[in-house]
Image (cartoon, coloured by chain):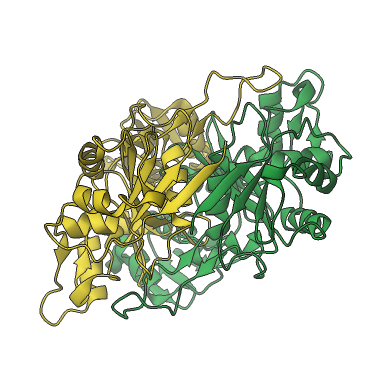
Chain colours: A green, B yellow
Amino acid sequence: VTVHIIPVEGIGEVRHGDDLGDLIRAATARAEAALQDDDVVVVSSKVVAKAAGLTLRPAAGEDTEAARRRLSLTHEVLVETPHVVVVRTPSGLVCANAGIDASNVPGGELLLLPEDPDAEAEAIRVALADVARVGVVVADTFGRAWREGQTDVALGVAGMAALRDERGTADRDGRPLSVTLVALADQVAGAADLVRDKAAGVPVVIVRGLRGVVGAPGRAADLVRSDATDLFPHGRGWLARRLATGEGRAMRTGPPAEWEWDLVRAAVGPEQATVEGDRLTTAEGYAAAIAQACLLDLGYDVQVRHEDGAYRVVAGP
Amino acid sequence: VTVHIIPVEGIGEVRHGDDLGDLIRAATARAEAALQDDDVVVVSSKVVAKAAGLTLRPAAGEDTEAARRRLSLTHEVLVETPHVVVVRTPSGLVCANAGIDASNVPGGELLLLPEDPDAEAEAIRVALADVARVGVVVADTFGRAWREGQTDVALGVAGMAALRDERGTADRDGRPLSVTLVALADQVAGAADLVRDKAAGVPVVIVRGLRGVVGAPGRAADLVRSDATDLFPHGRGWLARRLATGEGRAMRTGPPAEWEWDLVRAAVGPEQATVEGDRLTTAEGYAAAIAQACLLDLGYDVQVRHEDGAYRVVAGP
């Protein structure tokens, strides 16, 4: 079955206090964009933030880039170079400049991320519910690790599945499918971006023809990796920043697993140290520092104590 | 303008030696899937690999998971845990299990990634050129950092732009757009996946209605981040593995930048060490190891020499 990606024309500049549900109802009243049951309505997070008034003016004499950097550094920092700051937001989103936008905002202000995009998506879904039974995605444009360019991803989801779970289903030969969890709402957000021209301002797009998607429970929070499964929690230079500033958060609580200790022991030089429970003991400062760095990199908080001629490196607070 | 995502039905199991161009010509001859100029044809990398015969049988007595892990570990390893191996392939793709697929392959064999997906995409484009002027994307399903679930991305591109460069264009207020490089081919690949059901086998999808895309030069290699801009080159535990095995590759060549030395000095304790050019000198083993770990994390090769009571930590081979 063909899927259609339909831009909704005619939504002008969105301002603080505007009712997005009303604006979308009016703009989709035209025949070609008339909402149908099972449509997914993809709304740019920029207009959600504008309607909510989430703009900030830089301090007096501060340029927008400096203000954006200052605000970004109030978050958990994964990478800080002179050119970019990548952070993890309180809701777990990893993004450059904390997702703060300096373009398409009148007056040189900064535009923040919506505070609860799942709730914003749900409010839009409810506002449209008497027109049609739709799903809603609040989408923003993020960079990716390892790949050039940005794609749109789902920050908020309502009235539809965020992930399509194919675990437990079998391929055509009956073997379990190894790729099993499709990031459906992210792919919907990216598909919607295909009909957007960012400069032209098409903040609402309809994705029509998806089957078995609308009506299932889902939220964008499901798309955020947990600490336990996050394999890339730290960017280039994170370790030095962590040691220099003391800032940072443990992704794991101790004691480390046996395979982790095996790795740390191998890095340290196995003859240099003994391990018991959550701690490694060594007489050598060099070995102690290697163990500390490796345990931090593995996601643990680390304390180093130097007593009675021995270093004790403890994985934990 | 609406974009249409059209599944191409009727392509059966693809086998070694099959001509994909012929298969796609035959399957798209039907009216609803008849190719038009400016269509993008999205082809699953699985069928590209099958047609090229890129299957491998596990060794005698070896199960498919063990064989996949063994093959994955021949690549540059970014993360190795008991449960998963994430590697960077020679062409720069970062993916779990080296992109080796164990599902949907008859007989329990493993399916490798296509060796030159841009060339495979170009061959399909040329084979279809007398039917219509199309772009081609060879798509595969990859996980992402920080986000749950997989999305389809473009491994190969021909006859179309891989990225849409909006740098230099202005927003509606005339300010430069800060999000400026759209990963177009990845979003096309993800959109195509919306009409696929992986278990049902829809290896070819037409994306119709994109404007200004087909005919522009592009290749999927453009979507791979260079070492210079890669901010997440290492996964959790990479440092310990790097120190334990000695394997690994420098992303950067020295000497480190001044801001990097500032960070390393701050991590080491500024009174502990002096820095000159590409090297740090300290009397303390603890400080030397911290500097070594931080420079590795920043992407440099590091040598540590202990001579005349001083440690010299050199960023470089």
Which residue is pictured at 39% across the width and 63% down the height? A283
Q: Report x, y in % for residue B61.
A: 14, 82
Q: Report x, y in % for residue B211.
A: 48, 31
Q: Is residue B259 above or below residue A168?
A: above
Q: Is residue A17 above or below residue B105?
A: above
Quarter assignment of residue A96: top right
Q: How many labels were placed on the picture?
A: 0
Q: Report x, y in % for residue A144.
A: 48, 44
Which residue is pictured at 15% across the width and 55% down the height? B52
Q: Give whichever of A287, B26 is nearer the camera.
A: B26
| B271 relative to B275 in the view: left or right | right
Q: Give whichever of B211, B142 is nearer the camera.
A: B211
Which residue is pictured at 73% across the width and 53% down the height? A117
| B109 relative to A175 in the view: left or right | left
Q: Using the rendered image of the protein, determine whether residue A44 is visible from the camera's viewpoint.
A: no
Q: Residue furthest right?
A: A17
Which residue is pictured at 32% across the width and 30% down the height? B254
Quarter assignment of residue B110: bottom left
Quarter assignment of residue A251: bottom right
Q: Quadrant of the C terminus of chain A?
A: bottom right
Q: Report x, y in % for residue B195.
A: 46, 58
Q: Using the rendered image of the protein, determine whether residue B112 is visible from the camera's viewpoint.
A: yes
Q: Give whichever of A251, B23 is nearer the camera.
A: B23
